[in-house]
Image (spheres, helix red, strand yellow):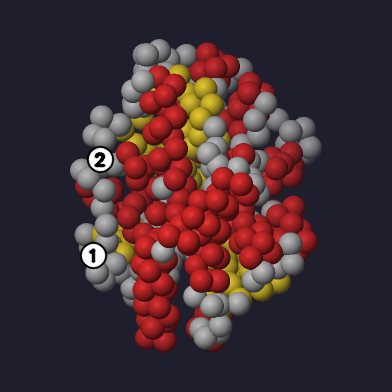
């Protein structure tokens, strides 16, 4: 299968589209026209590339985790080190691209939503750099468990607006940000943090993040002279995973695994696995897989990783699922925690809890593969933001007796 592009109405097959109030359609069309023009503008492209290199620190390394690979046995595991970007995750790439576009459009204020806080920090950072006013919506539950990122956003000059409705997590923050945008369309741009939402955001965010896969492809060919056997990345909304997968979609020999939040188990209903256990509906302006009841009411998602605590997924992921090009799986909270500790202790790298979900699936796969095989795991962010959560799980002991296959000491 080659690389997919949405049709003129923003659909990937039956997924995607622009299911929004009429008041937003004009704004979305304005963003779409501006993005198409900016992509053709040499000065815009050069400024974006320059910031990625000199400000973000790209390209990020592709690191062979030798001790982790030896511990697990089987396939060699490479980590795409997005945690080494400025601000600590892949989110800065998209935030810079969209904030540049906002300035290019003549907008002076940006809005954003955030769950884990990484997109909020990235947007606040890009706004400070480019001289934009920044307003960020964040659920109060996420504010509590992501306090370090909340402080970083405020230090960067952002106005952080608490959202108390519903589960007070990412879904509610995104809903409130979109409502605010409706009231401020003339001078404000909405920086959506994932490859979700209404057209043109899913494809635009994926395009900005596809540098992850482009770099990884060049790097693995240089290191081992061939493509990897498999790619793994966590899936919440879906930007880091699509960023890695997209440049490899035309390479049928490369298997791809999107790892969702299994939470406390699918049978409990406390999870964030829209693709593994959801059904097709409409959320935040796009038709996609999501968590809903028999009457179409959105259900609350659960994950120990706040960036995966979202009851939907980007529409291109739904399309790739329907084609069978990407396999979507899930791991439970305790498996992700075990992977978190394993990477920290074996490699001296503290991963984000979101990224730890992909590591946990690699721990299942690697022992079943030969030593000549290679996996690339997208380490989408660093775990500084999650230390308080992890440390508090066992009364401050900082340990977890998990049961993830292959990771027991």
Query: Does 39 appear above or below 89?
Result: below
Residue at image mark 1: 7
The answer, for residue 269, to whether it is visible in the render is: no
Identify the image quadrant of the N terminus: top left
Residue 340 coordinates in the image, percent (x, y): 61, 33
Residue 33 coordinates in the image, percent (x, y): 36, 73
Q: Is residue 227 left or right of residue 57?
A: left
Question: What is the quadrant of residue 85 in the picture?
Answer: top right
Residue at image mark 2: 250
Residue 250 coordinates in the image, percent (x, y): 25, 40
Question: What is the quadrant of residue 347 in the picture?
Answer: top right
Q: Secondary structure at mark 1?
A: loop
Mark 1 or mark 2, which is nearer the start of the sequence? 1
Q: Is residue 15 left or right of residue 24?
A: left
Query: Does 66 appear above or below 322?
Result: above
What's the residue at 43%, 60% (across, down)?
Answer: 42
């Amino acid at each position: 299968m080659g690389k997919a592009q949405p049709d003129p109405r923003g659909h990937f097959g039956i997924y995607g589209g622009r299911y929004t109030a009429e008041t937003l359609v004009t704004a979305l069309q304005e963003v779409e026209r501006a993005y198409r023009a900016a992509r053709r503008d040499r000065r815009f492209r050069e400024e974006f590339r320059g910031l990625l290199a000199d400000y973000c620190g790209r390209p990020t390394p592709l690191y062979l985790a030798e001790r982790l690979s030896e511990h697990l046995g089987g396939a060699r595991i490479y980590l795409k080190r997005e945690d080494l970007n400025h601000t600590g995750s892949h989110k800065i790439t998209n935030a810079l691209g969209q904030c540049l576009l906002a300035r290019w459009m003549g907008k002076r204020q940006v809005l954003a939503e955030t769950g884990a806080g990484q997109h909020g920090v990235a947007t606040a950072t890009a706004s400070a750099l480019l001289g934009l006013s920044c307003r960020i919506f964040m659920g109060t539950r996420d504010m509590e468990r992501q306090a370090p990122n909340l402080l970083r956003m405020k230090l960067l000059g952002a106005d952080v607006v608490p959202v108390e409705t519903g589960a007070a997590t990412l879904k509610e923050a995104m809903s409130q940000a979109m409502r605010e945008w409706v009231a401020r369309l003339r001078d404000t741009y909405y920086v959506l943090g994932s490859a979700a939402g209404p057209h043109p955001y899913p494809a635009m965010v994926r395009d900005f993040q596809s540098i992850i896969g482009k770099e990884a492809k060049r790097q693995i060919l240089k290191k081992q002279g061939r493509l990897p056997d498999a790619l793994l990345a966590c899936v919440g909304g879906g930007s880091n995973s699509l960023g890695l997968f997209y440049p490899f979609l035309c390479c049928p020999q490369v298997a791809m695994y999107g790892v969702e939040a299994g939470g406390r188990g699918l049978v409990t209903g406390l999870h964030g696995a829209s693709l593994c256990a959801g059904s097709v509906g409409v959320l935040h302006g796009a038709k996609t897989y999501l968590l809903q009841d028999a009457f179409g009411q959105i259900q609350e998602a659960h994950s120990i990783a706040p960036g995966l605590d979202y009851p939907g997924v980007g529409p291109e992921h739904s399309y790739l699922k329907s084609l069978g090009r990407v396999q979507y799986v899930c791991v439970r909270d305790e498996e992700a925690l075990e992977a978190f500790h394993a990477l920290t202790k074996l490699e001296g790298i503290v991963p984000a809890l979101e990224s730890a979900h992909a590591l946990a699936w690699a721990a299942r796969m690697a022992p079943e593969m030969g030593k000549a095989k290679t996996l690339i795991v997208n380490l989408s962010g660093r775990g500084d933001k999650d230390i308080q959560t992890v440390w508090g799980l066992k009364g401050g002991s900082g340990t977890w007796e998990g049961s993830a296959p292959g990771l027991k000491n």
